[in-house]
Image (tube, helix red, strand yellow):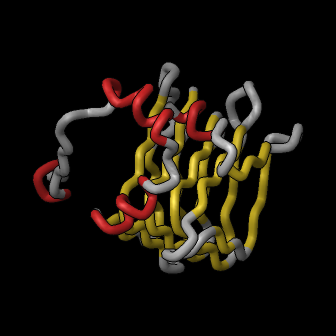
Amino acid sequence: MVGSLCGQANATLSTVPPTGALALENQSWGSRSAPELRCIDGLVDPGDGVTLSGDTSGNGILIVKNADLIVTGSLRWEGLIIVTGADVSFRVTGSSSKEVLGGLIVNETGSPTSKAILDVQGNLRLLFSRQAFSQSAQLIATSTLSAHYGDLPMTVRQDYWRAITP
């Protein structure tokens, strides 16, 4: 489904350079009135990383394929963040505010290595938001949704941290 989303005409595409590292600072992608579909594609080799530093905000869908998403600065995202590919992770470091209103999917498609797939070493607030999902859903073409509707989960599960943390 990610390939279909990133292939849509309304998607803004970026790629990780041959060095394997893409650093983005003080980004503003989309708003409540105009959400955006952003796709960042890493290289085939593992170890690529996309680092968001400074003050980053956005509204819509952010997809990072074949690379780690590393958030070192402040972040406020309303919508959906998807990190997918082999040997990928979502990493948060630093004490600045990081808030995702909507959802986060880390889809490891390969054989996980010893690194953490979800690595939170700083502040992170991840809050479900039906409104943020509804705004993000406007970005998905009907043809894309129809083609992948059968692949989508029919139930949503949310675990409370105390239930899974001793």
Furthest toward the left, the residue is 163
Furthest toward the top, the residue is 111
Q: Position of residue 28 (x, y in %)?
A: 66, 74
Q: Residue at x 49, y 75 (%)?
A: 32
Q: Residue at x 40, y 31 (%)?
A: 146
Q: Quadrant of residue 25?
A: bottom right
Q: Position of residue 152 (x, y in %)?
A: 32, 32
Taking the image as shown, residue 43 lies to the left or right of residue 69, namely right
Q: Is residue 164 above or below residue 5?
A: below
**Callout count:** 0
Q: Residue at x 73, y 25 (%)?
A: 44
Furthest toward the right, the residue is 18
Q: Residue at x 47, y 62 (%)?
A: 121
Q: Position of residue 57 (x, y in %)?
A: 58, 74
Q: Nearer the viewer, residue 162 or 132?
A: 132
Q: Is residue 4 above or below residue 130?
A: above
Q: Is residue 22 above or below residue 116?
A: below
Taking the image as shown, residue 14 lies to the left or right of residue 158, namely right
Q: Is residue 66 above or below residue 69?
A: above
Taking the image as shown, residue 19 lies to the left or right of residue 166, namely right
Q: Nearer the viewer, residue 6 or 89?
A: 6
Q: Quadrant of residue 120?
A: bottom left
Q: Position of residue 140 (x, y in %)?
A: 49, 46
